[in-house]
Amino acid sequence: MADHSSEYWYPAAAYLYALHLDGPALAWEYLRRHPDYRQDWLRRRRRSNSAQRWGLRLLENPVLDARDAHPAWFPDHDAVLQLYPDADPPPDAGAFTLWRLPGHKHLIHDGRRLILVVRWPGVCLHFALAPDLADGMAYAYAIRASGTSRERCLALLASLGKLATVTGIPPVALTGPRPSLAPLLELHTLQALDATLAGASLREVAEGLFGTDAVADDWHADSALRARVRRLVRRGNALMRGGYRRLVQLPPVEQGRAAVTAKRP
């Protein structure tokens, strides 16, 4: 059996960042792996209108993972907060001061307006800036009246609250609780998908995810481990081929041209 330990998908540590991604960021991780999307990126000068088939305003470079990419989804996910000048500000209204916002900031033009992305450990906020909003103005937040749940509104308010209390520079390291099962599922799914796209068999995928000892102890036709790996591969393929759209509240579309299945051992 071939040694895959030096391949990019084998070390689980390379996927740890996936434990902290929100829905839109996870959607990008699955989309950027799609072979058809990668082809559209390479042909973007000849096919300038191909972004919308993927639910984007503009094509984003698939080489960039969610830590560096800034995909502009169309229409906006409900995590995007709109910022407008406050038409009737109180005397103590806060002023919009771009460079005083804490954390890492990215200002992007998505072809229609400016989007400000602010990242701080545990917080990632997207702001759509109104054209007439200027630095130093009193401002107001706006969200869609429909399609945004009460829970989502509360989560946005909590994130804004965290950002409002931040002072200083981002910490070098943070400690936190053990990841829940949901983020771990995404980590394993992405790793299994990459292994499959690289041509690995189900057994090789299992060895990369769970170790050679675990596979040696429990790998046979009806083993729970084999069934688990098969489900991960199936899930990753489904998310890559359109399932990612539900993570950004986009309607489903037809599947792409190619299909990827893992080689059987």
Image (spheres, grey):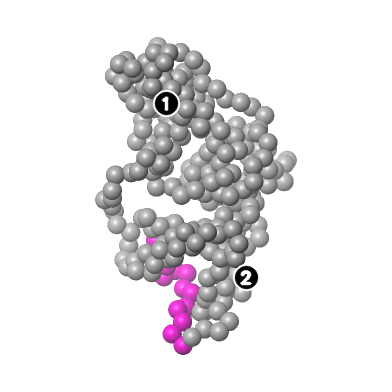
User: Disc 1 on helix, strand or loop?
Assistant: helix
Magenta region, mostly helix, strand or loop?
Answer: loop
Could you tell me residue 112's position as x and y percent? Answer: 66, 60
Residue closest to the eye, 115 or 238: 238
| Residue 38 appears in view | no
- The vertical placement of 251 against 94, above or below, is above
Residue in the image at 41% along x and 33% along y: 188
Residue closest to the eye, 108 or 246: 246
Residue indicated by mark 1? 228
Residue 95 among those drawn in magenta: yes
- The vertical placement of 140 against 7, above or below, is below
Q: What crowding class fits label 2: few (fewer than 14 Cα within 10 Å), some (14-19), or many (20 or more)? A: few
Residue in the image at 64% along x and 46% along y: 251
| Residue 112 appears in view | yes
Q: Which residues are magenta?
A: 91-103
Q: Residue flagged by tag 1: what amino acid is it?
A: Arg
Q: Residue flagged by tag 2: what amino acid is it?
A: Pro
Residue in the image at 53% along x and 74% along y: 140
Residue in the image at 34% along x and 36% along y: 13
Residue indicated by mark 2? 131
Residue 254 among those drawn in magenta: no
Q: Quadrant of the N terminus?
A: top left
**Identity of the residue furthest to the bottom in this view:** 91
Could you tell me residue 68's position as x and y percent? Answer: 47, 48
Tell me which numbered mark, 2 or 1, is placed earlier along the sequence: 2
Total number of numbered discs in the rendering: 2
**Identity of the residue furthest to the left in this view:** 175
User: Disc 2 on helix, strand or loop?
Assistant: loop
